[in-house]
């Protein structure tokens, strides 16, 4: 029952660690009559001393609380006396404590007056409370509000009078103003520019906590952020978000690295796979730092509504916990998304903390953006000489685009790109008539795709160019991770029938923009991205792309290509170098890491492709042939023993039972399933030993080249493989395909997976080892002096002082100051986060750095 919550609230107050025992006894012995008696005594005293004030203000509050007590008795609540004691007792205490200080006394009466003005005559509704138990919730809320005030006021006025007299004015002012919400939800329509706004906020917060500008936030503030992306499998689940935030936390709070390492060891995994472990670690970081900001953008792009709810509930709970611990402002959370479905809304911030972005909020920003882009229409480009527009034409162009964009930055950008593709000034001016410009985003995407098609069809052999554009778009939206341009080129250059790769003759010599136009962003480092998640959805739904067919094509490509890769196992060094120059291994990073995902997608989502369509027989034959070839090539490395979970064929797989490749698909799926159910270290491999060995050998040879090395004629290695040739060997790591441009950076990255310098005695103070030998030696000298060649270090003895002690969480050492403890914890791993601002020498403790910097100051003087 809701009414039982009253006893819980009263018990929480009674067991509060700040409540003194004598005051608790005083509260529990109080009642309405005692409160009225004390008020009468105070009024008489003030009458004698001629310091009367309007004490009648408290009368409505006393009446309201008396009504509450009578209602509780009427509904036969057994703990009425105990519960109401924590109303009457604090009233008596606060009036006595503040009686001799006019301002404080008046402030307390003001609060009681405000309570009295809003509390209804509860006793008049006694029949309602008896007949409708749900209405008891109202009584709980009233009681909770009164107790909240009493807790805050008691915390102040229970201090020594000499102390609270100094704190009263400032503390009361802060209590009298409703603090800002600690969690905010900003939501707006698609294409509003929310992600851009999130990025600006991240940048601004990082600037504000530096010394370069006047600080509006504390210098020690931390900012963490995460961008959800529905097209990226590593950025759309609750665990992905927690891992992304935690990764940033570790980078900025390295002194807590031992705790993370201990959690990893105790979980039996070398990476985070459990959301509960991540939650516990993040909560520790939130408690450790004095101020932090968390920004989660694109929450609506999470995989499921459940993932959205989990994310919102966890961070909301953490913000509330910080606020309830009288740490208001320690944690600020911002969610940004499109409007959410109703079940998710219930988990999001509400009322004033729920801010809907309106068209007027970004109208000026859109106009400024359009105004900045207008000169593009007059610039000479490779395919245009500029439109030679008058001032009136420019003004009309700006006005129409801004008017049609409403609240969508994305629409403004797409409209400009679409208009820039017009062949003549006449066509441009015709399009900017309001009725000629598409209204909806889907219509704009259709126009852009139509413009790409029209432009390509005008070229010699135009139909082939258009088919190429459709291929590229299909691969981009159906790939298991964002593809790079050289990977797309490698697919085009690969001949699965003759099993050769011919970059020289088959790679596209035009840019991606020619085939994909304004539908993609071409970024530095060979990266290509669909311009927006809405564009991806449109492309998958439009008539030009058959999603199931594209998925099947990619699966066949992976299987065929891996057979080609395995055939290189017998290559000598010279032959392997020749194949590197020809670009034969350009697709290996994608195929090796994603082949099993494409198999899973095919049997879970593509059954209809093989069901009597125009090309069903062709796809069945091609996939069956590729699957058989793959199994024949790698048969010795495939798991033969059936996995216990697959004794009964999965329903999705059973749908293929009538097809020619069914048995081979079941056999291969058993291998994939067994591999994916293995330990993390096992899943971090390709899953086929022959391919693991071949990939390693290919990369060893490839790393002997540089991006500028000659490949074929004028082509370079970078044209075929991208700029980063040094890759992580772990399949599940994103640097398996992103890589680094220097070997040293890759090696430094590898140390984050496994630190190469372990403690010689394998102690539990440094379970993860060290990133450098110097840090390991320092640890040995500190904790194992008998193993060190350096002088022994003796700890001075101290008399027991009875002062508060702070104990290290990973060793028995204790300290009298928390700052010293933090400095000590860094020594476990040789971390030195405090660098001298002059010579950049680093120190483990702030005091050590400050002492060192004084040396520079003396030198200057």
Image (cartoon, rainbow, N blue to C red):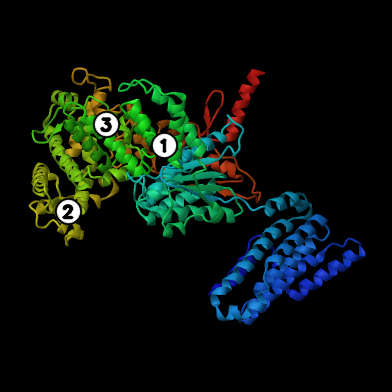
Which residue lies under the disc numbered 1?
Answer: 412
Q: Is residue 758 above or below residue 330?
A: above
Q: Is residue 546 above or below residue 742?
A: below
Which residue lies under the disc numbered 2?
Answer: 607
Q: Position of residue 761 (x, y in %)?
A: 39, 42
* Residue 487 visible in image: no
Residue, x 45% and y 57% (percent of image)? 345
Which residue lies under the disc numbered 3?
Answer: 485
Question: Cα distance, mark 1 to mark 2?
Answer: 40 Å
Pair 1/2: label in front: 1
The numbered mark, 1 or 2, whose residue comes first in the sequence reads 1
Pair 1/3: label in front: 1
* Side of 106 relative to 602 (left or right): right
The numbered mark, 1 or 3, whose residue comes first in the sequence reads 1
Q: Nearer the viewer, residue 117 or 651?
A: 117
Q: Position of residue 453 (x, y in %)?
A: 24, 34
Q: Position of residue 799 (x, y in %)?
A: 64, 46
Q: Nearer the viewer, residue 369 or 93?
A: 369
């Amino acid at each position: 029952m809701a009414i039982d919550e009253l006893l819980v609230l009263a018990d929480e107050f009674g067991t509060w660690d700040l409540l003194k025992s004598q005051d608790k006894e005083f509260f529990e012995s109080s009642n309405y009559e005692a409160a009225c008696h004390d008020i009468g005594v105070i009024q008489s005293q003030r009458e004698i001393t001629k310091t009367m004030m309007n004490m009648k203000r408290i009368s409505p509050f006393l009446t309201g609380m008396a009504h509450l007590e009578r209602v509780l008795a009427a509904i036969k609540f057994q703990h009425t006396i105990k519960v109401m004691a924590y109303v009457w007792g604090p009233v008596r205490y606060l009036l006595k404590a503040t009686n001799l200080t006019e301002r404080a006394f008046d402030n307390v009466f003001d609060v009681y007056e405000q309570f009295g003005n809003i509390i209804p005559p509860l006793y008049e509704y006694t029949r309602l409370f008896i007949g409708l138990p749900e209405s008891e919730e109202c009584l709980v809320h009233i009681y909770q509000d009164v107790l909240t005030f009493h807790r805050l006021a008691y915390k102040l006025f229970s201090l020594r009078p000499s102390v609270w007299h100094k704190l009263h004015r400032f503390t009361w002012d802060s209590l009298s103003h409703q603090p800002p919400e600690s969690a905010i939800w900003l939501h707006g329509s698609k294409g509003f520019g929310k992600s851009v706004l999130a990025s600006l906020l991240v940048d601004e917060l990082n600037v504000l906590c530096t010394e370069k500008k006047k600080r509006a936030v504390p210098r020690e503030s931390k900012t963490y952020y995460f961008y959800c992306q529905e097209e990226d499998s590593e950025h759309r689940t609750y665990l992905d978000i927690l891992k992304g935030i935690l990764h940033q936390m570790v980078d900025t709070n390295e002194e807590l690295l031992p705790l993370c390492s201990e959690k990893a060891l105790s979980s039996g995994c070398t990476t985070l796979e459990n959301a509960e472990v991540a939650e516990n670690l993040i909560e520790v970081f939130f408690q450790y730092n004095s101020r932090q900001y968390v920004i989660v953008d694109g929450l609506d792009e999470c995989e499921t509504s459940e993932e959205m709810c989990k994310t919102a509930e966890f961070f909301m709970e953490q913000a509330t916990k910080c606020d309830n611990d009288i740490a208001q402002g320690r944690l600020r959370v911002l969610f940004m998304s499109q409007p959410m479905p109703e079940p998710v809304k219930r988990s999001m911030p509400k009322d004033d903390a729920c801010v809907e972005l309106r068209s007027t909020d970004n109208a000026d920003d859109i106009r400024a953006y359009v105004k900045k882009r207008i000169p593009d229409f007059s610039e000479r480009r490779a395919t245009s000489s500029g439109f030679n527009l008058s001032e009136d034409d420019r003004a009309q162009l700006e006005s129409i685009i801004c008017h049609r964009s409403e609240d969508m930055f994305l629409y403004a950008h797409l409209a400009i790109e679409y208009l820039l593709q017009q062949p003549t000034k006449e066509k441009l001016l015709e399009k900017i008539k309001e009725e000629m410009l598409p209204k909806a985003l889907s219509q704009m995407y259709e126009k852009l795709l139509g413009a790409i098609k029209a432009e390509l069809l005008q070229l010699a052999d135009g139909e082939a160019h258009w088919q190429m554009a459709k291929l590229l778009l299909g691969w981009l939206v159906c790939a298991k991770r964002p593809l790079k341009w050289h990977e797309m080129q490698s697919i085009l250059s690969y001949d699965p029938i003759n099993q050769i790769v011919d970059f020289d003759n088959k790679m596209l010599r035009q840019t991606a923009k020619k085939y994909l136009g304004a539908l993609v962003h071409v970024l530095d480092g060979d990266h290509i991205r669909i311009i927006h998640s809405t564009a991806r959805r449109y492309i998958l739904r439009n008539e030009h792309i058959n999603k199931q067919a594209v998925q099947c094509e990619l699966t066949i490509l992976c299987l065929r290509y891996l057979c080609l890769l395995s055939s290189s196992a017998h290559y000598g060094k010279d032959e392997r170098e020749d194949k590197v120059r020809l670009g034969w291994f350009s697709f290996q990073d994608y195929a090796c890491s994603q082949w099993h995902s494409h198999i899973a997608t095919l049997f879970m989502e593509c059954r209809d492709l093989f069901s009597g369509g125009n090309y069903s027989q062709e796809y069945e034959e091609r996939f069956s042939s590729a699957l058989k070839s793959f199994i024949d090539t790698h048969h010795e490395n495939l798991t033969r023993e059936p996995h216990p979970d697959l004794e009964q064929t999965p329903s999705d797989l059973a749908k293929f039972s009538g097809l020619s490749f069914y048995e081979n698909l079941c056999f291969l799926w058993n291998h994939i399933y067994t591999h994916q159910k293995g330990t993390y270290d096992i899943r971090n491999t390709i899953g086929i030993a022959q391919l693991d060995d071949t990939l390693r050998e290919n990369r060893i040879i490839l790393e002997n080249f540089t991006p500028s090395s000659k490949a074929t004629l004028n082509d370079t290695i970078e044209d075929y493989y991208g700029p980063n040739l040094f890759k992580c060997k772990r399949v599940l790591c994103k640097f398996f395909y992103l890589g680094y441009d220097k070997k040293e950076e890759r090696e430094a990255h590898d140390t984050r997976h496994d630190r190469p310098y372990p403690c010689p005695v394998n102690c539990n103070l440094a379970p993860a080892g060290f990133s450098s030998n110097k840090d390991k030696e320092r640890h040995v000298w500190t904790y194992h002096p008998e193993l060190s060649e350096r002088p022994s270090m003796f700890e001075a003895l101290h008399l027991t002082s009875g002062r508060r002690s702070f104990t290290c969480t990973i060793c028995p050492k204790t300290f009298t100051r928390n700052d010293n403890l933090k400095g000590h914890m860094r020594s476990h791993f040789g971390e030195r986060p405090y660098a001298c601002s002059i010579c950049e020498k680093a120190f483990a403790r702030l005091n050590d750095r400050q002492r060192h910097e004084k040396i520079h100051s003396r030198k200057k003087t």
